[in-house]
Image (cartoon, rainbow, N blue to C red):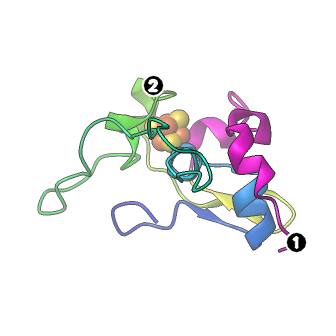
Amino acid sequence: MDAGQIVESASTAQIFYEPKHPYNQALQKSIPALHEKGETLHTIPGSPPDLSKPISGCPFAPRCEFAEEKCVTSTIALKEISDGHFSACLRIQLKEIALSPAHLPEKALARKVNC
Ligand code: SF4
């Protein structure tokens, strides 16, 4: 969820190992590796949206590295993009970007467990 909106819905394994929303991917990059000391944590730039004001388009747009104008001007609904995997990312829905586990740091992939 981002700003009270469901942005991705799928099985646990899909959410962790086949992220289909840049916010989910950014959150996973921020998970610290407990066995590595001195590592600089990945942070998501900017601040969460002000929920006292209406949000136009994607709530993650101000902080998303893939954002384009249409992300702010479009109404974006959660859409099934593969079997049982739903994303509210417009650019994923349009197949303009693809997020793969390769985007995740090796430390995140190393933590893969049976989900
Ligand atoms: S809709 Fe646009 S701004 Fe929102 S997550 Fe997707 S690419 Fe980023």
Tell me the quarter of the picture where residue 80 sits: bottom right
* Earlier-in-chain disc, 2 versus 1: 2
Does residue 80 appear anywhere in the picture?
A: no
Q: Quadrant of residue 17?
A: bottom right
Instruction: Sort mark 1 into few (<14), some (14-19) or many (20+) by Cα contacts within 10 Å.
Output: few
In the image, residue 71 lies in the stretch drawn in magenta: no
Q: Toward the viewer: 37 or 100?
A: 37
| Magenta region includes residue 98 | yes
User: Looking at the picture, how far across and down is residue 42, in whole percent?
Assistant: 46, 38
Residue at point 26%, 37% (across, down): 46
Residue underneath mark 1: 114
How far apart are labels 2 and 1 at the CA level? 36 Å
Residue 68 is marked as 2
Relative to residue 60, is residue 111 drawn left or right? Answer: right
Write the start and end of the magenta stretch as one range: 89-115
Which of the 4 image quarters holds residue 43? top left
Query: Does the beta carbon of the residue at mark 2 sit less than 8 Å from ligand 1?
Result: yes
Left or right: 2 in relation to 27: left
Q: Residue 85's x, y, as percent?
A: 76, 63
Q: Which amino acid does label 2 sit on?
A: Glu
The residue drawn where x is 62% and y is 53% is: 35
Could you tell me residue 58's position as x and y percent? 41, 46
Q: What kind of residue is marked 1?
A: Asn
Mark 2 Cα within 10 Å, few/some/many (few <14, many 20+)? Answer: few
